[in-house]
Amino acid sequence: MPSEFAEAAWRLTAFLSVFVIMAVVETLLPRRVRRESRAERWPTNLGLVAIDAVAVMVIFPIAAVGMAFWAQAQGYGLFNIVGVAPWLAGLIAFVVLDLAIYGQHVATHKIPILWRVHRVHHADHDLDATSGLRFHPIEIVLSVGFKMLVVVAIGAPPLAVFLFEVVLNGAAMFNHANFAIPKSIDRVLRLFVVTPDMHRVHHSIERQETDANYGFNLSIWDRIFGTYIAEPSKGQLGMTLGLPNQQGPGPQRLLWCLAFPFRGKAADQPESVNADREVA
């Protein structure tokens, strides 16, 4: 397992590599025409990423991998107590962590106070690689805390946690990306992992579609728990993304996103929108 410094370097390298690849592919093979330009959206989405990173470092000086090392040293967690072989513990831990993230995602939609924060992610009018990183800092802090609890509870091996973090981060950018995958390939891919077309359904303004396709990495959970929808009712190109009552310019502003969870009933009032505006 790499040192803390090496771990951060590897994670940053993986993040930048996936981000650049997704950005290039989105440019060359766009799936949908953007409503707003990258210049309008990226400063807000990437600004949230920067704030999230600072918030996590301040509140959790030891990240999930560090917690895994601590639990291992103390003998805490199911796998450490039972003495499961490292390779098997790592494999199971990866799957359990992915299931935990699926369950957490469902909770953010079903529990009102969590939805108030999570809707910042859903307010984006377009989807691309930056959308997979667009989360309110409160949600990120809660998510990291929850993940750390799961890591300690099951005694996840540090290497498995490290790999899961890298894969989950890359998967989030991949399945939010705005690029076209041939349908024949997409049909096969989504048997195993969440594809952009599969996850895009989840960002529809139609409530029954928003309440579907919660997976971030493995696609099996949506099928097991009956939350899978193959395609949006209006098609991938005809669907409207975002929140039904927040189709105005607000969601593309950083301060708006930071304040949105605290707006109360005002957040349920519709904003003006020019739905026909498109950016090439």
Image (cartoon, grey):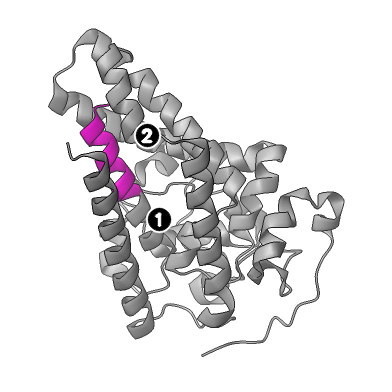
Name the residue at 43% across, 72% down: 178
Instruction: Give the Cα distance between marks 2 and 1.
Output: 18 Å
Give how far across and how far down residue 166 sits, in percent. 30, 49
Q: Secondary structure at mark 2?
A: helix
The disc at residue 172 is 1
Of the two numbered discs 2 and 1 in the rendering, the one whose residue sits closer to the viewer: 2
Amino acid type at circle 1 is Ala
Name the residue at 34% across, 82% down: 29
Name the residue at 26% across, 53% down: 9
Q: Is residue 124 left or right of residue 191?
A: right
Instruction: Answer with the quarter of the image where residue 203 lies.
Output: bottom right
- Label 2, on which residue? 64
Q: Is residue 278 left or right of residue 29?
A: right
Q: Is residue 228 left or right of residue 179?
A: right
Q: Give the mark, 2 or 1, whose residue is nearer the N terminus.
A: 2
Amino acid type at circle 2 is Ala
Instruction: Answer with the quarter of the image where residue 66 lies.
Output: top left
Residue 263 visible somewhere in the drawing: yes
Give above or below for 69 relative to 1.
above
Q: Nearer the viewer, residue 249 or 3?
A: 3
Give above or below for 242 relative to 156.
below
Give how far across and how far down residue 175 sits, in percent. 39, 60
Residue 134 visible somewhere in the drawing: no
**Location of the N terminus (image quadrant):** top left
Give how far across and how far down residue 265 sits, in percent. 86, 51
- The magenta stretch is 155-168
Q: Nearer the viewer, residue 7 or 262?
A: 7
Q: Is residue 164 magenta?
A: yes
